[in-house]
Amino acid sequence: MLVRHLGLRLYSEVMGKQFTLLRRRVLGEAPDTLLLAQHPPVYTRGAASRQQPPHKLPFPLHTVDREGGLFYHGPGQLAGYPVFDLRERGLTLAGYRRSLEGVLMEALLGLGVKAARRKGAPGLWARGRRLVFIGVAARRGISCHGFALNVNCDLAPFQHITPRSGPGWTSLAELLGKPQDETAAAKAVAEAFLRYF
């Protein structure tokens, strides 16, 4: 498995790289690869979601072909896009999602945060708030889209897509009481993936 750190890149640019890689993986021309990136502020929405923004959003909205509803991406958040052959690993999409949660739980423990699953809500939670978003899909048995871990990101843009009565979002910085080393967080996630996959 390869890990590629892309740095801060436009969401559309990373999607282009992911789907080029996916086509090559389908043809057996590329190994399983984890793309890690950050994005300038943008919202995304799963194509099958009926969830509508409650009002005009402050950043662009992309509708994408993944599970899940509205989500915010921004600087200080680690976005991961695994392009893996699920058939070779004997994984269904649901099994793969659970595997992602397990890998990220392990990485977060190493960073000093105990995160947990919540029934019926893909992703990971800490102290009653969501820390990790997971929204995946597969094409011809190859995974695409992925996860986002809030490290130091501004949480205010989530207010535009989260009901006031909802549990809300958190970040490593908020949970640990100080800004976190984003390079160390990316390294912990990459190492956990290399151990598991």
Image (spheres, rainbow, N blue to C red):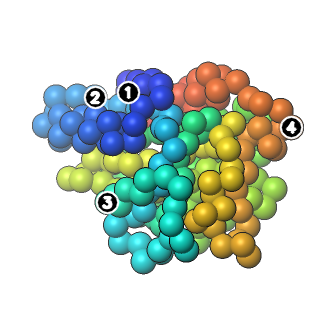
Of marks 3 and 2, the one in the foreground: 3
177 above or below 118?
above
Earlier residue among tags 3 and 2: 2
In the image, which disc is placed on residue 177?
4
Earlier residue among tags 2 and 1: 1
- Determine crowd level at label 3: few under 14, some 14-19, many 20+ residues with C-alpha closer than 10 A: some
Mark 2–mark 1 CB contact (< 8 Å): yes
Pinpoint residue 71: horizontal percent, then vertical percent: 52, 58
Name the kind of residue labelled 4 in the image: Gly
Q: Mark 2 points at which residue?
A: 31
Q: Is residue 108 left or right of residue 57?
A: right
Name the kind of residue labelled 2 in the image: Pro
The residue positioned 58% from the left and 28% from the top of the image is 186
**Callout 3: SS:** loop
The residue positioned 33% from the left and 42% from the top of the image is 12
Query: Which quadrant is the N terminus positioned in?
Result: top left
- Determine crowd level at label 2: few under 14, some 14-19, many 20+ residues with C-alpha closer than 10 A: some
Cα distance in 3D space between marks 4 and 1: 34 Å
Cα distance in 3D space between marks 3 and 2: 23 Å
- Determine crowd level at label 1: few under 14, some 14-19, many 20+ residues with C-alpha closer than 10 A: few
In the image, which disc is placed on residue 1?
1
Mark 4–mark 1 CB contact (< 8 Å): no
The residue positioned 74% from the left and 40% from the top of the image is 172
Query: Which quadrant is the C terminus positioned in?
Result: top left
- Whether residue 103 is visible, yes or no, is no
Name the kind of residue labelled 1 in the image: Met
